[in-house]
Amino acid sequence: MRRNTHIIGAMFFGVMAFFLLESLRRMVLPSPYWILPRSLSHVGHLFILFIASSIGGILPDILDPTYTSRHRRFAHSRVLFVIMIIVVVITILFLMAVVKLELLFLYYFVWGYVSHLFLDSTTPFGLW
């Protein structure tokens, strides 16, 4: 797939991840904790979402360049896909308690990376 497709897919996964996180936080935490901290506005949250998920969405093709014979090796592996899903679950658990910029960036970055692997798994070459 092309870079633009991966960026759009990563942003889509990032927006879905935002709604997943907010839904989980509203189900588990009492109402005063729904609001983002004063240091982070909703615009800042969306900025982190789009930047981090876009970087995560194109990183596998940077690590395994498409113009070499090494394309779709380590950065496109199924093992890494499972590890990223585990990181997402652990990050969700931490983000439900405390919203920190570093955790938000990691959360959306990993969702962008997962989106890249998911989109590549739908092609005839699949994942390694």
Image (spheres, grey):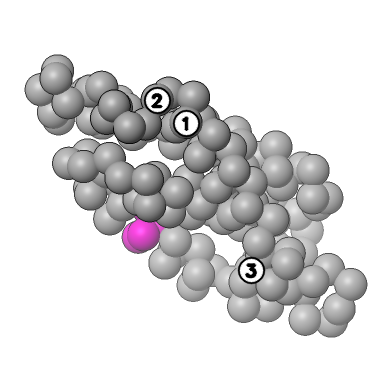
Q: Residue at x 30, y 45 (%)?
A: 100
Q: CA distance from mark 1 to mark 2?
A: 5 Å
Disc number placed over residue 90 in the picture, else none = none
Circle 3 packing at 10 Å, graded few (<14), some (14-19), many (20+), is many
Nearer to me, 61 or 39: 39
Q: Are marks 1 and 2 in contact (CB under 8 Å)?
A: yes
Identify the residue position indicated by label 2 in the image.
41
Q: Main secondary structure of the magenta part?
A: helix
Callout 2: helix, strand or loop?
Answer: loop
Q: What amino acid is labelled 3 in the image?
A: His
Nearer to me, 42 or 107: 42
Query: Whole-percent x and y of residue 42?
Result: 43, 23
Callout 3: helix, strand or loop?
Answer: helix
Q: What amino acid is labelled 1 in the image?
A: Gly
Which residue is most to the top?
31
Which image quadrant: the C terminus?
A: bottom right
Q: Residue at x 49, y 24 (%)?
A: 43
Identify the residue position indicated by label 3 in the image.
76
Earlier residue among tags 3 and 1: 1
Q: Where on the picture, by quarter, is residue 12?
A: top right
Which residue is most to the right?
67
The region drawn magenta spans: 85-89
Q: What amino acid is labelled 2 in the image?
A: Ser
